[in-house]
Amino acid sequence: RPYATSQPLQDWQQVARVNEHYARIHGYGFAYSQVGAGVSWDGKPKDAPACVHPDRGSRSAAWCKIPAIARVLLHGVGGRPCKRAMFIDSDAVVTNLTMSIDDYLDRARAIGDEALAGDEGSSPWSVLLSNNYWFNPDGPCTGLLYVDGSNGACGILRS
């Protein structure tokens, strides 16, 4: 859903603008998704919890990232199909606007990131998570989540 453009902007609105600018610079689509109590994953108001899994019941708003990513992979952004999607939390901002996502992944591969092992242009992963090193060095962080549109990734999202 579109984020408000009223002045003065709240912090998350400023971050969304920077991230949208980054996406435009590199020719990526940008979709903003707001979820939480009373807001569904497609931005429409509702009375039920934000995310309800068919088998596991009500989930926290953080789980709404999954249908938001799935929607982008299934339906694209702005009429353009997407083969890959990157989800970034509303409190995270891209700080190097000149480096594309592919450049970043190539750089990580070049310095030996084991998740990106393999030949250039191919990768053994379907879902790539960051980590919150300073707080939990061994745990995944879904604040930055990169997903390819493969059957494997879609299966992981469905699980």
Image: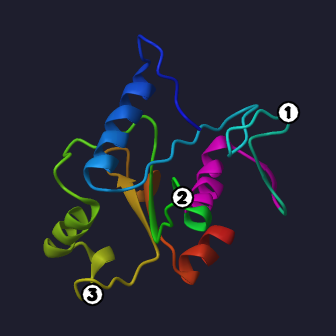
Look at discs 1 and 3 and give the one toward the viewer: 1
Marking on residue 118: 3
Marking on residue 150: none
- Position of residue 55 relative to residue 12, above or below, is below
Q: Main secondary structure of the magenta part?
A: helix
Q: Give the side of residue 156 with respect to residue 140, left or right.
A: right
Q: Amino acid at mark 1?
A: Asp
Marking on residue 79: 2
Q: Which percent across, then down, holds residue 81? A: 51, 67
| First in residue order: circle 2 vs circle 1 | 1
Rounded to the nearest angstrom, the CA distance separating label 2 from label 3 is 32 Å
Q: Which percent across, then down, holds residue 104? A: 22, 62
In the image, what residue occupies the spot 64% across and 51% down?
Answer: 63
Crowd band around label 1 with a 10 angstrom C-alpha radius: few (<14), some (14–19), many (20+): few
**Which residue was labeled with disc 1?**
47
- Position of residue 108 relative to residue 33, above or below, is below
Which segment is the magenta one? Answer: 56-72
Q: Is residue 93 visible?
A: no
* Residue at the outermost top position: 8
Quadrant of the drawing holding the N terminus: top right
In the image, what residue occupies the spot 56% across and 59% down?
Answer: 72
| First in residue order: circle 1 vs circle 3 | 1
Which residue is at the front of the view, 42 or 139? 42
Quadrant of the drawing holding the C terminus: bottom right
Q: Amino acid at mark 3?
A: Gly
- Position of residue 133 relative to residue 123, above or below, is above
